[in-house]
Image (cartoon, rainbow, N blue to C red):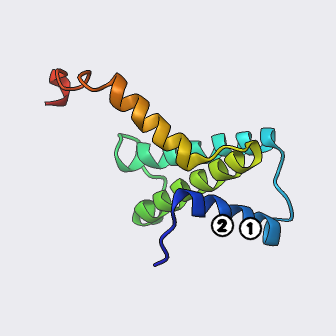
Amino acid sequence: MEQLSIKGAQKKVDQWIKDIGIRYFNELTNTAILSEEVGEVASLMARIYGEQSFKTKAQEASAKEDLAGEMADVLFVLMCLANQTGVDLNAALLKSLDKKSKRDKERHAGNEKLS
């Protein structure tokens, strides 16, 4: 299976848009699509790990595979938005991890709920 870095994935999404997708939807449309895709992930999570029931046995049988696909859809649209707005997700994620590491260094260690 092909491995992608975050930067490589952003480039691959951009190339797909240019070759197959014609052009990016505008940023507002992609934001709405992102919200829709996140909702689909949430719906599956509620059924797989939560208390909500599946509508059919067929949905239950394919749920984990469907979840992977929906998560990939979220990532795809997020990368579209990053490409459109000039965000380097690789750099942004590293910066976020650094910020969280400094801010939360001792925050979670004393949390009894996590023991």
Q: Residue 69 versus residue 21: which sits nearer the camera?
A: 21
Nearest to the observer: residue 107 or residue 63:
107
Query: In this view of the protein, can residue 57 be seen by the observer?
Result: no
Q: Amino acid at mark 1?
A: Gln
- Pointer 2 with pointer 1, Cβ within 8 A: yes
Q: Residue at x 70, y 52 (%)?
A: 80
- Give percent across and percent down for residue 15: 74, 67
Graded by Cα atoms within 10 Å as few (under 14), some (14 to 19) or many (20 or more), the crowding at tag 2 reads some
**Horizontal and vertical percent for residue 78?**
63, 48
Who's the residue at 46% across and 66% down the image? 58
Residue 54 sits above or below residue 87 on the image: below
Image point (72%, 40%), residue name: 31
Label total for image: 2
Q: Quadrant of residue 35?
A: top right
Q: Is residue 91 above or below residue 115?
A: below
Q: Which residue is mark 2?
A: 12
Residue that label 1 marks = 15
Percent position of residue 8, x then y? 59, 64
Whether 13 is drawn above or below 77: the answer is: below
Quarter placement of the N terminus: bottom left
| 98 sits to left or right of 17 | left
Locate residue 11, reporting x and y percent: 67, 62
Question: Looking at the image, which residue sits at the far bottom?
Answer: 1
Whether residue 94 appears in this view of the structure is: yes
* Residue type at the position of mark 2: Lys
Q: Is residue 57 left or right of residue 49?
A: right
Mark 2 to mark 1: distance in Å? 5 Å
- Give the structural element (helix, strand or loop) at label 2: helix
Q: Quadrant of residue 76?
A: bottom right
Secondary structure of residue under mark 1: helix
Going 46% across and 42% down the picture, which residue do you hit? 94
Assign the C terminus to one quadrant of the image. top left
